[in-house]
Amino acid sequence: MIPVTKTYFPPLKEYNKQLERIWKNEWLTNRGELVLELEEKIKNHLGINNITLNTNGTLPIQIALNVLAGCGEVITTPFSYVATTSSIVWEKCTPVFVDIHEEYLTIDESKIEAAITESTKAILATHVFGNPCNILEIERIAQKYNLKVIYDAAHCFGVTYKGQSIFNYGNVSTCSFHATKIFHTGEGGAFFCNDEELNKKLFYSHNFGHNGPEDFHGVGINAKMSELQAAMGLTVLAHIDEIFKNRKRVVDFYNNNLQFDSINRMLHREDTVWNYSYYPIIFKTEQQLLKAKKILNENNIFPRRYFYPSLNTLNYVIQTSMPISESISVRILCLPLYSNLSSDDVSQICLILNKLNN
Ligand SMILES: *Cc1c(COP(=O)(O)O)cnc(C)c1O
């Protein structure tokens, strides 16, 4: 079977080495040696000054919203993983959807101003499939209306925009290190914040609000990463260059061998170094997508409909019409892409799709 993605498993011996450190320390959580070391290694690897590891990629979004958006309105994208919207609703904020760019698949910044009201507190936008939003324009709007910007950068490990890590942008950026993501700790995530004051608030929030053992800054939750997760992270990070190289090989093969007459690709924003995180293709109609999916499934190949459905159609939001997001979400399919996907398999996928499109 060829799934849409496969978790990267590092050599077990190397993982055991990290576990031995944990057993020796007899220390499992509360920011132990391995978590601190992983933070330093990620900082060095990405060239960033600030990271706080979390136990998954959803809690940092919720913490950022909790600290920055109160129970206000949050302008957001309908084209993302459900966690982007569910976090807003979970934090008792109100999602206000703004449609996306047909080519870039990110929030259409030219439509943001029309959605701003007195109650708007923040913009929560996703760099979809590692493709950056129009960061400069969103920054300008946020400054003009005194809004906070949170980027769901769950797909963005290793992406740079205008020469620096994409995690440096926005008041807060978040990432996911879930097993299906490009760099992973099994379950895991992080927030990135270069504003010292704000970063302190986020940091306290992710650890129950603790200020030492007997004092509290305020309300908080538990989003700490454990040593066991960090052990996986340290082991995987040692192989990250090889992971990128292998994924690039698959992406290059798709790019060079798929016929793009009746399917489209996402347009990458300029000044971006991308990370080969996903390979979405966009059909002309949903019928074409369903036909392709069926034939691939019959050949034991299982692409995924990311992202479907459009999040403005969830049954727990105020439903508004988002024509572009709704149209894209029924026509977009992510093709298998993982480190050890063989050339024969990619080649077979291309053959099937090309035959279908002729
Ligand atoms: C994976 C993902 C998340 C959630 O991350 P978890 O680590 O699974 O909690 C949030 N947003 C987007 C866009 C994602 O793809």
Image (spheres, rainbow, N blue to C red):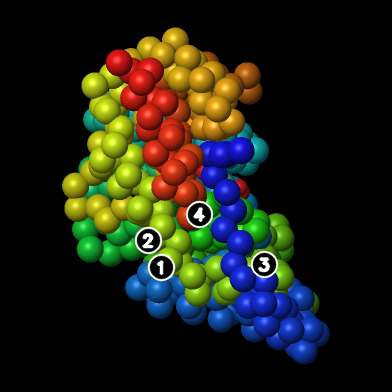
**Residue shown at 43%/35% (left/top)?**
348
Residue annotated with mark 2: 245
Q: Nearer the viewer, mark 3 or mark 4?
A: 4
Looking at the rendered structure, the kind of residue marked 3 is: Gln
Q: x, y (%) of residue 17?
A: 68, 82
Q: Residue at horizontal 47%, vertical 41%?
A: 345
Q: Earlier in the sequence, mark 2 or mark 4?
A: 2
Taking the image as shown, residue 207 lies to the left or right of residue 108, namely right
- 10 Å neighbourhood of mark 2: few (<14), some, or many (≥20)? some
Q: Quick one: label 1, few (<14), some, or many (20+) residues within 10 Å?
A: few
Q: Which one is earlier in the sequence, the residue at label 1 or at label 3?
A: 3
Residue at (50%, 54%) from the top-left corner? 340
Foreground tag (4 vs 1): 4
Please state which amino acid type lies under the numbered disc 2.
Answer: Lys
Residue 346 coordinates in the image, percent (x, y): 42, 41
Can you identify the residue that label 3 sits on? Answer: 229
Looking at the image, do the residues carrying marks 1 and 2 touch, with CB atoms under 8 Å apart? Answer: yes
N-terminal label among 4 and 1: 1
